[in-house]
Amino acid sequence: MIKPFIQLAAVLIFLTGCQPEEQTVEMEKAPLQQLDSEENGLSISLRKVTDSELTIVIQNGRNIDFTYGRPFRIEQRIDNVWYVLPFNEDGSAFEDIKLLAGPRKQTIETVSLSQLADPLVPGDYRIVKSFSAFSINEQGAGVDGEAFWLAAPFKKEAIRSE
């Protein structure tokens, strides 16, 4: 009578050992650890930060155009190292469009954080975007200069309970 229970227990222990381990996602280090919020007369800052979106201010202080797109990265600083936060894997992508930051103009852009795989936890973050100087060549075609990256830091504060 006890023998079947011992056999069942042995099988259960064996099967438990065969379960796949929980996979942990290793965060990818940001490719650029040092980024400024201003370069070439162009700056990026944050006007508003909520749990669901960021309002970005792009300030062009020069007499030339800069181009940029919708793509962005959110990076989190952990132990003084920046890591790229993953986006959802639902197939959504950024709109493939060039936007213009006109000479001596301010541009406001709002980005949704709902594209991130997980909500932000309290900590230090930055939004990172790519920009290029833009000009028209002799043939009348638009030409982008070399791309450069700007970052605007922000904090996600812990919610205080009273």
Image (cartoon, grey):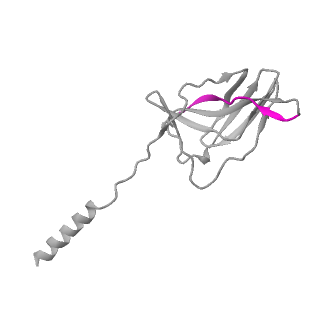
Relative horizontal placement of residue 21, taking residue 76 as reference (left or right)? left
Could you tell me which residue is drawn at 43 percent across and 29 percent down? 79
Q: Looking at the rendering, which quadrant does residue 13 occupy?
A: bottom left
120 or 140: which is nearer to us?
140
Residue 91 placed where, x, y %? 61, 55
Residue 28 placed where, x, y %? 49, 39
Q: Looking at the rendering, which quadrant does residue 143 occupy?
A: top right
Residue 14 placed where, x, y %? 23, 64
Could you tell me which residue is drawn at 76 percent across and 40 percent down? 98
Image position of 131 with respect to 104: above or below: below
50 or 56: which is nearer to us?
56
Q: Which region of the structure is painted magenta?
A: 140-156
Farthest residue, direction bottom: 1
Q: Quadrant of the N terminus?
A: bottom left
Relative horizontal placement of residue 125, taking residue 69 as reference (left or right)? left
Q: Looking at the rendering, which quadrant does residue 111 occupy?
A: top right
Q: Main secondary structure of the magenta part?
A: strand
105 or 30: which is nearer to us?
30
In the rendered image, residue 144 lying in the magenta stretch gets the answer yes
